[in-house]
Image (spheres, rainbow, N blue to C red):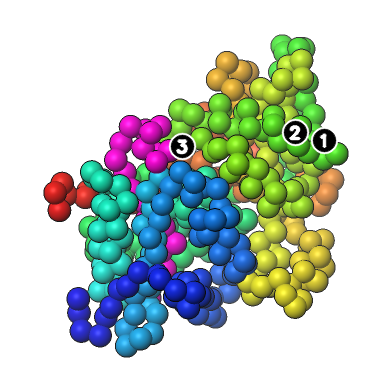
Amino acid sequence: MPEGLSVSEVSSGRDLTGFVELPYRLYAGDGDFVPPLRSEVRWMLDPAKNPFWRHARRTLFLARRGGRVVGRIAAIADDEHNRVHADRTAFFGFFECENDPEAARALFEAAEAAARKLLPGCDKLRGPVNPSMNDEVGFLLAAESEPGPPVLMMTYNPAYYLDLASAAGFAKEKDLVALLAPVDDRSFARLGRITDAVRRRNPELTFRTIRMEEFPKELAKVKVVYNGAWEQNWGFVPMTSEELDAMAKKLKDLVYPPIVWFVEKEDKPVAFMLGMPDFNQVLIRMGGRLLPFGWLKFLLGKKKVDRVRLLAFGVLPEYRRKGLDAVCYFEGYKAAIAAGFKTVEFSWILEDNLDLLKPIEVFEGRVYRRYRLVSRTVPSGS
C-alpha cells in the first residue's frame, strides 16, 4: 500500500456516513450531478431493509489518504445471478473516487479480495452495479455522451472513472445505451397506421393505463410480465416478489398513470410499459435531503418536469413481434404531448438489442448516452 494511503472495511456508523457522504464532496460544483437522497442510499445498502440482500452479500470499503476519505467501493455477491447464469461472477458497485489511480487500484483490489470470500470460486469481477442489474448500472462514457444531468435512476460520473478502471485491469464487457427522442406528433401519421393495424390483427387484446385504485392487483400483473419478459436478456436476474414490492413502494407516488400501460388478454397481462416523469429535474435542486425544505422543493418543482424516461417495456415471449410496443408508445406519446412533456429518454437498452433499438427510430430516437459495464478475471487460487 502506498505511503499515506489506506483501505479499510466499513465497520461503524461513522464509516457508513463517510461512505454515503463522499459523492456530495466529490461532485461539489458539478452542475450536472443529481444528489441522491441520503435516506435512499442508506436504504439501498441496508441488509435489514433492502430485500435484495436476502439473496446477496456485500462488503463496503473506504480509501483514505491522511485520514481523509478519497474513495469508496462495495464488493457484492449475488446468489441469484450465479444461479440464473450458472457462473461465478461477483460485482463491484457504489464506486466513487478522486482522480487517484493508486487509491482506485487499492479499492478494486480490496473488492476482489472480498469477492473471493463472499463467493468462493469467484472467477470474474464485473461492475459497476448499484447493487444489481435491476438498479443503476454502468460507467457513463462521457466522451461518447452528450452533457447534461442524468435522468431518473441513471448513473453519472466523471470522465476519468473509466480510466481508473482501465488502469486497474478492467475492460469492456457490455455497453448500455440511452436514446433521446422529441415528444411531438411528427411521427404520428406513420405510427398511427401501425397502431391501427396491430389492433385489427389482435382484437382479443386490450390496451389500457394503470388503475391506481387497484394498485396491489396491478402490481401482481407487473410481476408476471417483468420476470417473464426479460429472462433471456444478458445479465438479467429476476426480481423476487419482495424486491418488486419494495420498488413499487418507492415509485408509487411518482407514477403518472397516462404513461403506464398494460396489454392484456382476457384480463391476463401479456405486456407492460413503464414511463416515469424525470423527477431528477427536481431532485437536482434538493441537495440529497428531504428536510427541512426538500419536500417543498419537490412539490413545487413537479410542475416544471418536462422530460419522461421510458424505464421498461416488456412482452411475454409468445406475444413478441406483434407490434404491441407501437400501440403503447403511440398512446403514451399522445398523453405526454397533452401533459406538456418535451423529450423522452428510452433507457437503458443493451447495445445489441436491435428488437428494441430499431422501433425507436420511428420517433427520431437517437443514441445520445452510453454506459459501460467492465470486468476483469479473478485468477484462480489467488
Residue corresponding to mark 2: 218
Foreground: 49 or 355? 49
Q: Which residues are magenta?
A: 79-98
98 over 161 or under it: above or below: below
Q: CA distance from mark 1 to mark 3?
A: 28 Å
Which residue ends up furthest to the bottom in the rendered image?
A: 66
312 over 35 or under it: above or below: above
- Find residue 328 and report its horizontal and vertical position in percent: 71, 31
Foreground: 136 or 117? 117
Q: Are marks 2 and 3 in contact (CB under 8 Å)?
A: no
**Quadrant the N terminus occupies:** bottom left
**Residue flagged by tag 2: what amino acid is it?**
Glu
Q: Is 339 placed left or right of 62 in the picture? A: right
Task: Describe the element under mark 2 as helix, strand or loop.
Answer: helix
- Find residue 340 and report its horizontal and vertical position in percent: 81, 52
Residue 214 - label: 1
Residue 236 - label: 3
Task: Describe the element under mark 1 as helix, strand or loop.
Answer: helix
Identified at 76% across, 37% down, the residue is: 216
Q: Is residue 84 magenta?
A: yes
> Which of marks 3 and 2 precedes in the sequence?
2
